[in-house]
Amino acid sequence: MTLRTGAQPTFREALDGLSTAQKSSKGAPAYSRYVNRRLGRYLAAAACTVGLSPNQVTALSALSTFSGIGIIVVVQPTFLASLTVSLLLVLGYALDSADGQLSRLTGRGSMAGEWLDHTIDAFKVGSIHLAFLVCWWRFYDLEARWLLLPLLFQVLATVHFFSTLLMDQLRRSLGAAGKAPMDANRSSSALYSLAVLPTDFGVICILSLLLFVPWLFTGLYMFLFACTAAFLVLALGKWYREVKSWN
């Protein structure tokens, strides 16, 4: 559903319209699927009622996310600071979902908007683990070898983001050309969504709440790293075989 041009919808009208403006849930981790998209839906409806554009919502997402990342780097991780970081990251991630939902609802999406959204995502994915590295170095009493963990996690996160984005673009282009299935209307099972939950950026947002408890944060962070590494090993092989089958 796309709203009428020039119409100023109520919050309820926008919210109802967004129920049919959702992306496929295929491959989506549980947090994104069940929490973040729902939060984004409410934020998109609110943005629609006040006349914000998708790019303005993207800018708000960037402001919230990078404010949170900045606090990780410069502020001692007390409970209050960790709570603030987590809330800012959660809000930024929800707004990242809201801009796409708003563009589909209003029909105001553009190639430039999609480029802006993905570029900001690249900055986010490319900096979050480096921020943890600096935080550990400045505020945690850890041996130097522990600092390798966020560096390695940063590599995994970057490869995961790029590979996922590239696979999506390849499937779109080949699907449009009739050479590969689009899978636009398919959905992954709830079990799969839970299985890939550790790879979701939303889990990092929530985990940041524990920055003020170094032993707990680093332990859970190491667990997420191991899960992400295992997923990536399996996914890269699967994606390579999929792409190879298109030749």
Image: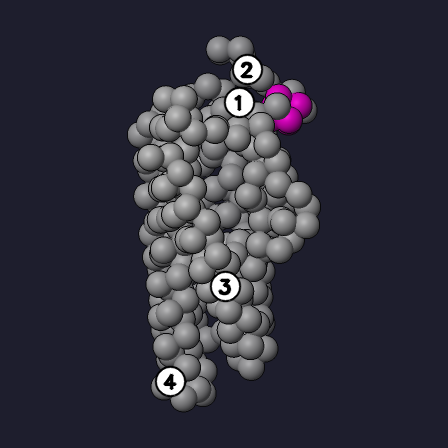
Question: For the residue labelled by badge 3, is the local secondary structure a helix, a strand or a loop?
Answer: helix
Of the residues under marks 1 and 2, which one precedes in the sequence? Answer: 2
- Depth check: 245 or 130 in front? 245
User: Mark 1, mark 3: which one is toward the viewer?
Assistant: 3
Q: Which region shows up in magenta? A: 14-19
Q: Which residue carries the number 4 mark?
A: 145
In 3D space, how far apart are the residues under numbered discs 1 and 3 (Cα atoms)?
37 Å
**Looking at the image, residue 170 lies above or below residue 205:** above
Q: Which residue carries the number 3 mark?
A: 230
**Main SS type for the magenta part?**
helix
In 3D space, how far apart are the residues under numbered discs 1 and 2 (Cα atoms)?
6 Å
Classify residue 137 as left or right of residue 186: left
Crowding near the residue tagged with mark 4, few <14, some 14–19, many ≥20 C-alpha atoms within 10 Å: few
**Looking at the image, residue 30 lies above or below residue 148:** above
Q: Residue at x 45, y 82 (%)?
A: 140
Crowding near the residue tagged with mark 3, few <14, some 14–19, many ≥20 C-alpha atoms within 10 Å: few
Identified by mark 2, the residue type is: Leu
In reply to whether residue 230 is colored magenta, the answer given is: no
Q: Which residue carries the number 2 mark?
A: 3
Q: Residue at x 35, y 63 (%)?
A: 155
Identified by mark 3, the residue type is: Ala
Classify residue 171 as left or right of residue 35: left
Q: CB under 8 Å between callouts 1 and 4?
A: no
Location of the N terminus by quadrant is top right
Question: For the residue labelled by badge 1, is the local secondary structure a helix, a strand or a loop?
Answer: helix
Q: Residue at x 52, y 30 (%)?
A: 183
In 3D space, how far apart are the residues under numbered discs 1 and 4 (Cα atoms)?
48 Å
Q: Which residue carries the number 1 mark?
A: 105
Residue 159: where, in percent of width, then height?
36, 55
Crowding near the residue tagged with mark 2, few <14, some 14–19, many ≥20 C-alpha atoms within 10 Å: some
